[in-house]
Image (cartoon, rainbow, N blue to C red):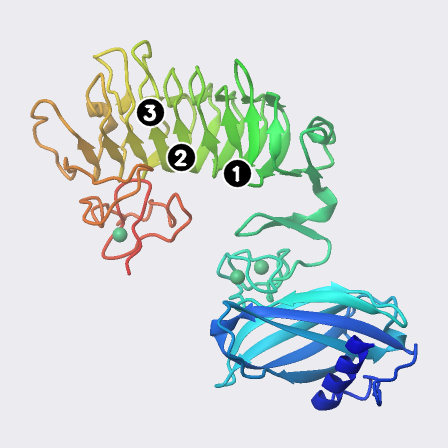
Amino acid sequence: MRRERHAARLIAALTLSTQLVACSGGETTANYCGLDLDITWVRALELVNMPLSGKFDDGSEAFSPTVLEVEASTSTSVIARRNLPLFLDDELALKRMVVTVEGRNAAGGLVAVGSSTVSLFVGSFVALTVDLFAPGVCGNGSIEGTETCDDNNTAAGDGCADTCTLEQDWLCINTPSVCFPEDNTAVVGPASLAGALADTSKAVLFLGAGRYNMSLQLSARSVTIIGVPGTIFEVSAGVAINISSGAVVTLSGLTVRGGGIQIEGAGTSAQMSKMTIGPSDGTGITLSDGAALRLSESRVFNHELGGLLLDGGNYRVENVIVQANGGAGSSIGGVRIVSTTGTSRFVNNTVAENLVGTASTAAGVHCVEAAGLKNNLVWANFGGAPISALCDAEHSNLGPYEEDPGPLGTNLSMDPRLSPDLHLLPGSPCIDAGDDTDGTAPGIDIDGEPRPQGDAIDIGADEVSAQ
Ligand SMILES: [Ca+2]
Ligand SMILES: [Ca+2]
Ligand SMILES: [Ca+2]
């Protein structure tokens, strides 16, 4: 009874809509649906009122919107909380509705918003917590406030609507959101992946977090596989992922350990982004026999037989960190480019801390034919020269050299000032030292941040934000 009297008093004070049942003297009947609303927000937002609304799934109003005033408080807790039992019309019973609370400050600005879904029952109170967060900016690639997706744009019809909510018949994954039509997308886990791969009606597989202790054999299969953070492919030996026989594969967000990735055969194509590949006792990625590779925003590290072997086929490698590969017994350190095509590109990568076992081979990037590398940071590789002459490096930072390398052309050879994760520290000579006058450099960096920033594009996989 104490709660109900309290509720009645609040409702009288708030003069809610006609659909809220007025109760006098603390007495109630069973002809109501109770909502025990608990609202939280960060006190520093200094809310003065909170517009409250409820809507059914079809968008129609469940009850008339109202505005809750926020009373001044002397509390010093970081989180403010307001408990508000509401009597609502009993016709709302068993209907799903979304309760949305906005937070406005003294200037009338919308500074917080939150919503929760609930179904009510006649004659009893249902508890519902609504946490208010800063309202999201739709299109910024980050899922905030009431957004259920954010695909870096405010366009509708691509799975994530102009209000950053999931569109009907689509599925989205990750942040920023990547969306595909629901009918050819399967959401799978370690136990169901093999079956989903065999079902060729599914062109897209969303992988839940977990350990997939299997090698992935993608032969003559067209498929897009996207993992959430924590999707791990691990093999104890051999190749972790083989892409061959004309397979057309897109991989994103996977961690691959214990073995490398092979892409082989004419007509085979692999596009990989946001991959974490390593460690293994083999080679990180091997491209051969006329296959095509596009590799971006990824790390290839700790492979005992070298990072990348590009041995036949078109490649485009950008925003990749190739770190700590090779060894005293390895003929490849960071990268070995055996053959190129007219459109092959190796741009804005960081190749560092690799070791090659044959001194006649460059430890960072070794090119067997003319390759035309640009905007790369090739630093602190051991066992051979930083880079071989046929790589034709330009606008890159190369070194350090044990002996005078002669004229460097457009390249630098200066301590790059790197953080432990091979990002550029303030004052790095790589900042604004790259070149993109021909428009072939990537428009983002390894972290997905836009390039160029500042006066020019930076050298290496990281672009420092210009503040
Ligand atoms: Ca957003
Ligand atoms: Ca969109
Ligand atoms: Ca820059």
Name the secondary structure under disc 1. Answer: loop
User: Where does residue 36 sit, x and y in percent of width and height?
Assistant: 75, 71
**Quick one: label 1 or label 2, which is nearer the N terminus?**
1
Q: Which disc is residue 253 wearing? A: 1
Q: Is 83 located above or below residue 285 in the figure?
A: below
Gap between marks 1 and 2, in whole Å? 18 Å
**Front tag of 1 and 2:** 1
Q: Is 118 located above or below residue 11 in the figure?
A: above
At horizontal 78% and vertical 72% (from top left) the residue drawn is 35
Mark 3, residue position = 324
**Quick one: label 3 or label 2, which is nearer the N terminus?**
2
User: Relative to residue 68, is residue 261 drawn left or right?
Assistant: left
Q: Which disc is residue 316 wearing? A: 2
Name the secondary structure under disc 2. Answer: strand
- Identity, as a three-letter code, of the amino acid under mark 3: Ala
Q: Residue furthest right?
A: 30
